[in-house]
Every structure is written in structure tokens, then in C-alpha cells.
Image: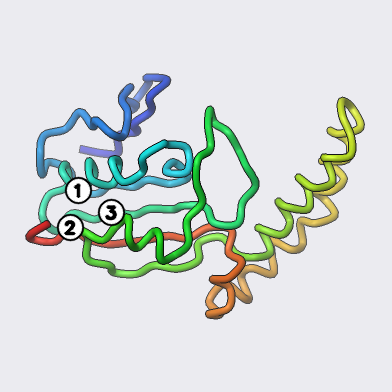
Amino acid sequence: DGAINIDPFRTGVNTIRAFGESLPFHNESVDVAMCAAVLEHVKEPQKIIDEIHRVLRIGGEIYIEIPFMQPYHAAPDDYARFTISGLKHLCRDFTEISSGVVVGAGSAIAWLLVEYGQIFFSGTMKKITRNILKIAVSPLKYIDRFIIKKPESMNLASGFYFYGVKKQNK
């Protein structure tokens, strides 16, 4: 009972060392699976979605967050970005409850501007530039709350989400 974190590189309280492609749970033994900011860091995200499908009970819930308009961010690697259509395709074996923009265009633009500004500097000047730009562009993130539900926000979203349930038959 309770939340369990899966991490391939560390263990700890409520954390099991495992890879998402091989979850240490019995078939249909999990009620809810949440996967946020992970799938862009794996070579084959469909394997993780399929493994979540295996361990979720019928009617079990899945929640995924995935980047769209985000700069490269290795941890340790960074392989892919997904459109909302791509995310829905990954989760095609689940019944969708809802999906959409989870982080909006203002956040995407802010992150891109910070990364862009750092290109021109190195060392201490790079750090100073990053911090100044973070402060300067931070208001863009707050605009997201006003535009995130607009259909056009899908075109420049920082990230998308999918919330669904495991169907009776795959």
C-alpha cells in the first residue's frame, strides 16, 4: 500500500531500483501508474508503456507527462519529443479519460530563451547569463494559466499529459 518510486540508479525509502521496461510487479497487481518526465530519456518508450499495461489491473489508471517543446536535457540521455498524437498513440491500449497540455507555451518559450542566451557564453558568464535570463523570462510562465486551455496552445506546449484506464482487452 502506498506510492512506490521506480528508479534505475538508486534505492531508498519507497524507492525500488529497477528499469521501467522490467517492473518488479506481478501481472495486474498495480492500481495506478504515473510516469512523468521519463519517456524522453529512454530509447524505447513503448516498452515502458507496455510494461505499465502488464502490471496495471483492469480499470487501473495511468498518468503520463511527456515533453514537446523543450530543449535537450540529458539525464543521462534524451531521445525524443512527442506531439499529443504521438502520446495518444503510445497509450493506445488504454481508454483515454483526458489528455492535453500540462505545461504551456510560456514555459516553453522561457526555457528556450534561457538556453539560447547561454550559447554565447561559458564559465561564470554563462551562469550569470542563465540566472539573469531566468528572472527576465519568468513572467512568461504565468501567462500559461490563461492560455493553456486554448486549442492553439497545443502547437507550442512545453509538455502534454495523458490520463487513462486499462481496458478489459489489449
Badge 3 marks a residue whose secondary structure is: strand
Q: Residues within 10 Å of mark 3 (few under 14, many from 20)?
A: many
Q: CA distance from mark 3 to mark 1?
A: 9 Å
Q: Residue at x 51, y 51 (%)?
A: 81
In the rendered structure, find residue 166 and report the number of the disc placed on it.
Answer: 2
Q: Residues within 10 Å of mark 2 (few under 14, many from 20)?
A: many
* Contact flag, marks 2 and 1 (Cβ < 8 Å): yes
Q: Amino acid at mark 3?
A: Ile
Q: Is residue 164 left or right of residue 166?
A: right
In the rendered structure, find residue 53 and report the number of the disc placed on it.
Answer: 1
How far across and how far down the image is residue 91, in percent?
29, 57
Q: Amino acid at mark 2?
A: Lys
* Contact flag, marks 3 and 2 (Cβ < 8 Å): yes
In the rendered structure, find residue 62 and report the number of the disc placed on it.
Answer: 3
Q: Residue at x 18, y 54 (%)?
A: 60
Q: CA distance from mark 2 to mark 1?
A: 7 Å
Q: Upstream in the sequence, badge 2 or badge 1?
A: 1
Q: Residue at x 82, y 50 (%)?
A: 135
Q: Residues within 10 Å of mark 1 (few under 14, many from 20)?
A: many
